[in-house]
Amino acid sequence: MARRLRFNGTGSDIGGCPSVHEDLDSGEVIVHGPPLADPVDVARLQHLSEGEVAVVVPRDLLVDWAPKERTRQVRTIDLEEFNSLFAKFEHTAWRLETRRRYASDETSDRWRRFVETGSVGDDSAESPAVGRWLETIRRQTAQGKRVERVRIVDRPATTGQRFLLDSARRNIGAGEDIRNLWRTDADRLHLPAEDFWLFDSRLIALLRFDDDDQLTHVDLITEPAEVVRCSVIRDAAWHHAVPWREFTAGM
């Protein structure tokens, strides 16, 4: 059975070698790079068995990208504590949304209006929870903080994705910067199928969903290598994503 490998990072800006991968099931680390070729050097290695190959990697590669713990340091929190993070971040809150459906969207009157008419309609009568979210975003962005999202969209877009595209103007009006990326482009960039918030480039809130697309809980991760990995994902996604107004105009 094939391993479930995750690319952690590379020490090369050009050829992608040497690089570090991690087996998501066993926790094993796979490093590949140029082989140690000089026979004199190879002869001096201890415990090199038949069939094994020695590779040369920069020390910084292991410092930056190898996991620092046997398992990721995770603290699971409930949704109430998760929501409180948006009142505490200091500079940036950045979101990657990759799912085709979010079940929580489908319980609102706005969803029913959208399914019936193709538009979310008048946003003046928001639910109390949505109202609190928008007020938090207004308050934070008024202080110069940034709240940003990249949403992945299929071709053709799912009903849930079209609902979020139509709803985005409400969030943008509150101060969010929302951009979109076609899934084919996300796949080309090797973006992961993960939903997370990255706070201040130091704290990851990894969103966990059940089989019915309901958000159940959130894992907080502070492991440096994992934070760097998500920061690289953010930079790639943000660079290629298209601002909401331009994206929707082209659909």
Image: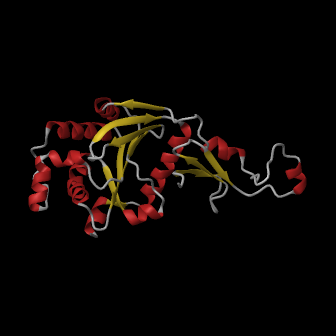
Q: Which residue is painted at 40% across and 66% down in the image? A: 184
| Image position of 226 (left or right of 39) | left
Return the residue nearer the eye: 50 or 232. Answer: 50
Residue 52 x, y percent position in the rendering: 75, 52
Vertical position of residue 116 compared to residue 172: above or below = below
Looking at the image, which is closer to me, 18 or 198? 18
Q: How many marks?
A: 0
Residue at left offset 17%, top offset 49%: 106
Outermost residue, right side: 40
Q: How is the image coloured?
A: secondary structure
The image quadrant where one finds the C terminus is bottom left
For residue 63, side relative to residue 5 (left or right): right
Q: Position of residue 217 (x, y in %)?
A: 33, 36
Q: Which of 243 and 162 lies nearest the eye of the viewer?
A: 162
Q: Is residue 16 left or right of residue 145?
A: right
Could you say where residue 154 lies in the image, as x and y percent from the top left?
Answer: 32, 63
Q: Looking at the image, which residue is at 80% across and 47% down?
A: 48
Spot the residue most to the bottom: 250
Residue 121 visible in the current orientation: no
Give percent across and percent down for residue 221.
46, 35
Whether residue 131 appears in this view of the structure is yes
